[in-house]
Image (cartoon, rainbow, N blue to C red):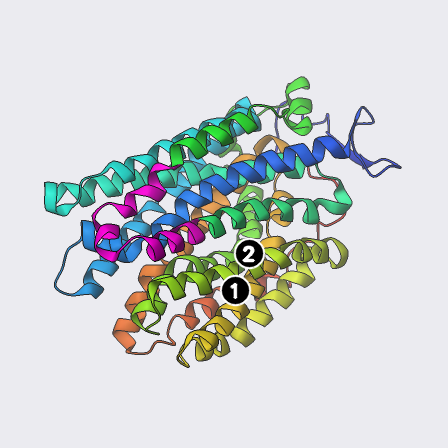
């Protein structure tokens, strides 16, 4: 893949102090690295708070926007809107990725958080079906589309920024901390919705209480924007800019040759074990535990929250293991573990009662934490600097739109068609098998400089 002045490579080396050095120049000190990681993580946490709120509020949104005599129909409609919004992910990737590769990671991430805050707050202001009829779900779709556009660039941009600051030997561990921000946002969303459900009567919750978690997106977005405005641009991007090596058309450069498609394929393999289990856990489970396992809404949200806390605890372990043993071996082991535990987890979930359900969720949460902890580094290492943001965004956007986004809908549909509450486990299996096979053929990239061309 060629870019202007591609022979001027941006090499990364490790200084004696462990700081990242750019072309033998000024090292990136640990304080700066921590500041950048914190800023990226906080912003991602705010973004994913807004995304998870929709899933946590799904049973109420189904009644507000899709009233039906059959609760399952309303819930399916709500999850369909959830899935349709993920069509916007690759579109968001097509917009934010090239923008981030042209104007920089920092400015693009600032714009992303503004779009998410406005889209989320707009959902909290929407009238329901009872007030404006069919226009209500249409407006909901538009707002979710805006959220999807924003989300299409958030994780790719944040991971690119942190990964380009991190040292070669610790890139997996450093990018795993970014997942803490995401997970913290998810936990905060679940806890907030749990608290609302516990404090506000069900009738009031359906009337106006559901709007609260969406409306606080505005002040949260302002906080995230302020934090991100105070960090410096990625040194890798600045070097590419100084050399005049930026690509004017990153999408064309990525998709215009077979090597670009191989890069996307490699990145997708590391996304497969993450997306479907994540949205089963975060978005499908709150409703599943209420409708099928017959837990209360508060119990369901509490159980999912505990599982996500466990995932957060083990995320750095996933990054550390990938740095030490390699991206390929960990991908293979992760997929084998998912194949071995998918159905046992659902056996526990369907055993009845809070404790068995919690055990099943914690099993899913543990594996989810390892998977997300080791996800970003190998994806970043798949693409050269001038098209890294674009490549990451497209790879994640496509896998999310085609697999992760439809997960709650497909899982609910599978239960309805098969009559088996174990059916969603097959979704984990279907994603783990191709990633396991691919792990035998891809190139190892850990402990090496990020590619520059």
Secondary structure found at label 2: helix
Of labels 2 and 1, earlier in sequence is 2
- Residue 434 has which mark? 1
Numbered-mark total: 2
Residue 185 seen: yes
The residue stretch that appears in magenta: 189-216
> Is 130 part of what is drawn in magenta?
no
Q: Main secondary structure of the magenta part?
A: helix
Residue 184's x, y, as percent? 53, 48
Residue 54's x, y, as percent? 34, 49
Q: Residue at x 52, y 64 (%)?
A: 434
Question: Are there few (<14), some (14-19), or many (20+) residues within 10 Å of tag 1?
Answer: some
- Residue at mark 2: 269
- Residue 422 has which mark? none
Relative side of 411 to 271, left or right: left
Which quarter shows the N terminus? top right
246 and 164: which is toward the camera: 164
Rendered view: 17 above or below 298: above
Residue 285 seen: no
Residue 213's x, y, as percent? 36, 43
Question: Are there few (<14), some (14-19), or many (20+) residues within 10 Å of tag 2?
Answer: many
Q: Are marks 2 and 1 in contact (CB under 8 Å)?
A: yes
Q: Residue at x 58, y 43 (%)?
A: 259
Q: CA distance from mark 2 to mark 1?
A: 8 Å
Residue 158's x, y, as percent? 56, 37
Rendered view: 193 above or below 101: below
Rendered view: 308 above or below 93: below
Secondary structure found at label 1: helix
> Is 194 part of what is drawn in magenta?
yes
Q: Residue at x 44, y 45 (%)?
A: 49
């Amino acid at each position: 893949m060629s870019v202007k002045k591609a022979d001027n490579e941006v090499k990364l080396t490790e200084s004696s102090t462990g700081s990242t050095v750019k072309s033998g120049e000024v090292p990136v000190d640990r304080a700066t690295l921590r500041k950048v990681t914190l800023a990226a993580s906080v912003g991602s946490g705010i973004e994913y708070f807004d995304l998870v709120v929709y899933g946590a509020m799904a049973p109420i949104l189904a009644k507000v926007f899709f009233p039906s005599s059959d609760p399952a129909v309303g819930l399916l409609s709500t999850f369909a809107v959830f899935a349709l919004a993920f069509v916007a992910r690759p579109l968001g990737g097509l917009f934010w990725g090239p923008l981030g590769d042209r104007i920089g990671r920092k400015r693009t991430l600032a714009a992303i958080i503004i779009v998410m805050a406005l889209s989320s707050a707009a959902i909290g202001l929407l009238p329901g079906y009872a007030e404006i009829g069919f226009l209500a779900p249409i407006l909901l779709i538009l707002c979710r589309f805006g959220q999807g556009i924003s989300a299409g660039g958030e994780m790719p941009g944040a991971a690119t920024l942190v990964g380009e600051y991190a040292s070669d030997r610790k890139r997996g561990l450093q990018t795993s901390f970014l997942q803490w921000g995401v997970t913290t946002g998810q936990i905060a969303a679940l806890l907030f919705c749990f608290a609302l459900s516990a404090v506000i009567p069900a009738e009031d919750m359906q009337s106006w209480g559901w709007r609260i978690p969406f409306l606080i997106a505005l002040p949260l977005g302002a906080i995230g924007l302020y934090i991100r405005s105070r960090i410096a641009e990625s040194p890798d991007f600045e070097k590419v800019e100084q050399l005049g090596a930026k690509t004017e058309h990153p999408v064309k450069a990525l998709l215009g040759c077979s090597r670009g498609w191989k890069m996307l394929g490699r990145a997708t393999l590391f996304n497969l074990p993450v997306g479907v289990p994540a949205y089963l856990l975060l978005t499908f489970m709150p409703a599943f535990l209420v409708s099928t396992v017959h837990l209360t809404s508060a119990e369901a949200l509490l159980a999912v929250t505990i599982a996500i806390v466990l995932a957060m605890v083990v995320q750095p372990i996933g990054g550390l293991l990938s740095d030490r043993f390699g991206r390929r071996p960990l991908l293979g082991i992760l997929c084998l573990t998912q194949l071995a535990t998918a159905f046992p987890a659902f056996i526990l979930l369907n055993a009845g009662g809070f404790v068995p359900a919690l055990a099943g969720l914690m099993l899913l949460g543990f594996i989810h934490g390892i998977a997300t902890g080791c996800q970003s580094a190998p994806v970043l290492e798949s693409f050269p600097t001038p098209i890294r943001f674009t490549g990451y965004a497209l790879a994640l956007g496509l896998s999310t739109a085609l697999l992760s986004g439809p997960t709650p809908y497909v899982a609910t549909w599978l239960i309805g068609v098969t009559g088996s509450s174990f059916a969603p486990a097959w979704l984990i299996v279907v994603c783990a098998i191709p990633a396991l096979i691919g792990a035998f053929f891809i190139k190892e990239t850990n402990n090496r400089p990020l590619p520059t061309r």
